[in-house]
Image (spheres, rainbow, N blue to C red):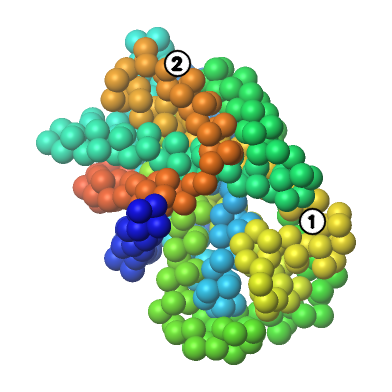
Amino acid sequence: MLNQVEIWTESLVSIVWGLPLVFSLCFSGLFFTIYFGFPQFKFFKDAVMIIMGKFDKHEHHGEISHFQALCAALSATVGLGNIAGVAVAVSLGGPGAIFWLWVAGFLGMATKFTEVTLALNFREVGPTGKVHGGPMYTMKNGLKKLKSMGHVYAIFIVLSSFGIGNMFQSNQMASVLTTSLQVPTWISGLALAAMAGLILIGGIRRIAKVTDKLVPFMIGIYILGALGILIYNFQHLPDMFAMIFEGAFNGTAAVGGFAGVVFKDVVIMGMRRATFSNEAGMGSAAIAHSAAKSTAGEEGIVALLEPFIDTVVICSITGLVILSTGAWNQAGIAGSEMTAWAFESVYGVFGRGIVTLTVILFAFSTVVSWSYYGEQGVVFLFGEKFVPVYRYVFIFFIFIGAVIQLKVVMNISDSVNGLLAVPNLIATYLLLGVVKKSIVEFKKKKESLK
């Protein structure tokens, strides 16, 4: 019976994350890119300046800074998908999938800009003075006739927080510690639950204080290790890029059993893994950004940096490491093990240690930030008084995720995670005029500071 349920739920994931959803997410990114005049280029410098505090004022609602909001959102998106997901994309789609990672990351920048700008426009201040926002509030306050979509989105975000944002992360972290250091899964689960619990009870302010230090550290470790590998294999870079561009458009990869991969599969694998990693179109990051002391236009501009860092930089580096070391052509390895093999081939046992540490940090940071996403869904549905209950249940499920098999749970969670995009994109298209107005307001503010 369990096997049959697994088959059913795997089919559900395939349907939800099939070509229609991937196409919708990528088309939306392309549409927003053109509609707003390529904000990826137009506002990239402004995004950096905003983070540095050039436009800061203290009269805005919010609880955290631009940089803290960016780090909180990045801590949720930069996760195991950057290590294992890219390896899966290359395994199934060949080197050409990396090109489509780049495309999806670039288009995702425009989508993040749009959905976060809307979230700041329609956020609320609760009875205790805390700021609440995200797509559910965008739908409630921006689309009065469709505010029921906000309840649907809130239910989905709560369910996703227990799956992809909780049990999957603790399960993978426990698995890595068991494989690398022979740590029993129940000990890993208790440790992660205890550490996360200490942070969660402090709300978004404590989460932000942790992630604004943890995110730069963990990303820095991973990128430095990966760059060392690319420098070591510098002579292979020209051939590597040739494989990427050739595989992207002819759809074949005649090395290591990849012969016959068709063009459609290459595109889907690259696009799917990128959107799954950077969450552009899902609306989840807008929840973290809604807590920023900022205007709508400014925070939307900051948000476009996330897919750039997550996909264009980190996912790309993982893919290049896998190709340059030949890990993608090794039989019998996949996912994070492929990335670990690539690091170990250059650094030895130390290289595997880098990947192990990175997996642990990525999983921990994802759990911390996703707890806040689910918490805001609970606030929307039931009010602030139910937050403590949610936190205790969330912490309990961290332990549960570490010690049980998750196949069915994760298939359902992946499906729900994909379904977040449906109400989010509908609301985004219907409220594009609000984003335009926010851009005009930002430009006026920018001119006034010259």
Query: Pointer 2: residues within 10 angstroms few (<14), some, or many (20+)?
Result: few
- Residue 352, labelled with which disc? 1
Q: Measuring from the top left, give residue 195's x and y in whole percent.
A: 65, 26
What is the spatial separation of the Cα atoms under label 1 and label 2, in whole angstroms?
38 Å
Mark 1: amino acid: Arg
Q: Quadrant of residue 76?
A: top right
Say whether residue 253 is left or right of residue 182. Answer: left
Which residue sits at x=70%, y=76%?
330
| Residue 80 visible to an observer of this rendering | yes
Q: In which quadrant will I find the C terminus?
A: top right
- Residue 388, labelled with which disc? 2
Mark 2: amino acid: Pro
Give the structural element (helix, strand or loop) at label 1. Answer: helix
Q: Measuring from the top left, give residue 349's x and y in whole percent.
A: 86, 57
Tell which residue pokes out farthest to the left in this image.
Answer: 145
Say whether residue 311 is left or right of residue 38. Answer: right
Closer to us: 154 or 314: 154
Q: Measuring from the top left, give residue 448's x and y in whole percent.
A: 47, 35
Closer to us: 326 or 52: 326
Which residue sits at x=48%, y=77%?
266
